[in-house]
Amino acid sequence: MTVTSIDAVTAPPRSRGRTVLRALGATTLVLGVTAAGGYAWLSQTSDVRNSGVAECTSITPDGGSTADLQGVCGTIDRMTSAWGRNDADAYGATFTENATYTTFLGTHYQGRADLTAAHRALFSGFLKGTKLADSFLGARFYGGNVAIVTTRGDRYDDERPSELSKTQTYTLVRESDGQWRIAAFHNTQRQPVMERISFLFDSATKPQAER
């Protein structure tokens, strides 16, 4: 005769579904922690070597004269100063009348009036009180009246950031009055983690300056 324990009879069977859910929860937690750690590692190891120089006039340009470089740098300096004062009209005056302006969000403005009006709204809104930081990667001159300047840049409120998160391209032209103005501006948000992943998968994609 088999004697069955009262506890064995009255105790409810363990829920298989609950066990599966606990296992899935633990697995998800481990994967989440691992992913977070991996993301942090990728982000921390994605620093750039080519961070540029602080002064525009310190660039060694490809072509152009010293006066040309000073003229181009003067325009960018006036643009930066106008942003720091939140002066939309002075900011717009550093661009040509038919300039194009593409933000890191992909927003595309056409013409001085368009970008000036947008910045007037921005300077009275969430960009109020902000400043611009730049570090200069290079300048190239084509003929006597066209220049391309590449920078790393960012905006900030109080303290200048140690790492600038955007890469920017300015195309400047010398107009009939002899003044250099920005004919096209393109701003790209750097994606450090994705950049790091691409370099890990194929090191040949890494720029020469970063090797």
Image (spheres, rainbow, N blue to C red):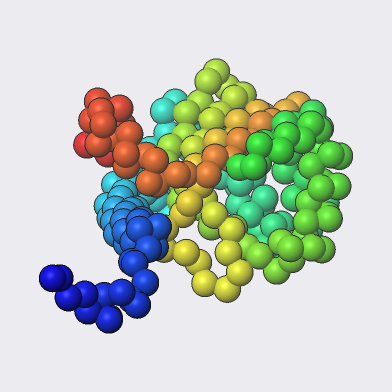
| 73 sits left or right of 22 in the view | right
Residue drawn at x 35%, y 58% as measured from the top left = 16
Where does the image place residue 203, in percent across and percent down from the top left?
23, 30
Residue drawn at x 48%, y 51% as measured from the top left = 165
Where does the image place residue 7, in percent across and percent down from the top left?
27, 81
Quarter of the image for residue 194 reads top left
Q: Is residue 106 above or below residue 192?
A: above
The quadrant of the image that shows the N terminus is bottom left
Outermost residue, bottom direction? 6
- Asked whether the viewer can see residue 25, the reply is no
The quadrant of the image that shows the C terminus is top left
Q: Is residue 196 above or below residue 6?
A: above
- Asked whether the viewer can see residue 102, the reply is yes
Q: Is residue 199 above or below residue 151?
A: above
Question: Which residue is more in the foreground, 70 or 150?
Answer: 150
Residue drawn at x 61%, y 24% as measured from the top left = 145
Question: Which residue is more in the foreground, 196 or 180?
Answer: 196
Where does the image place residue 81, in percent across and percent down from the top left?
66, 58
Outermost residue, left direction? 1
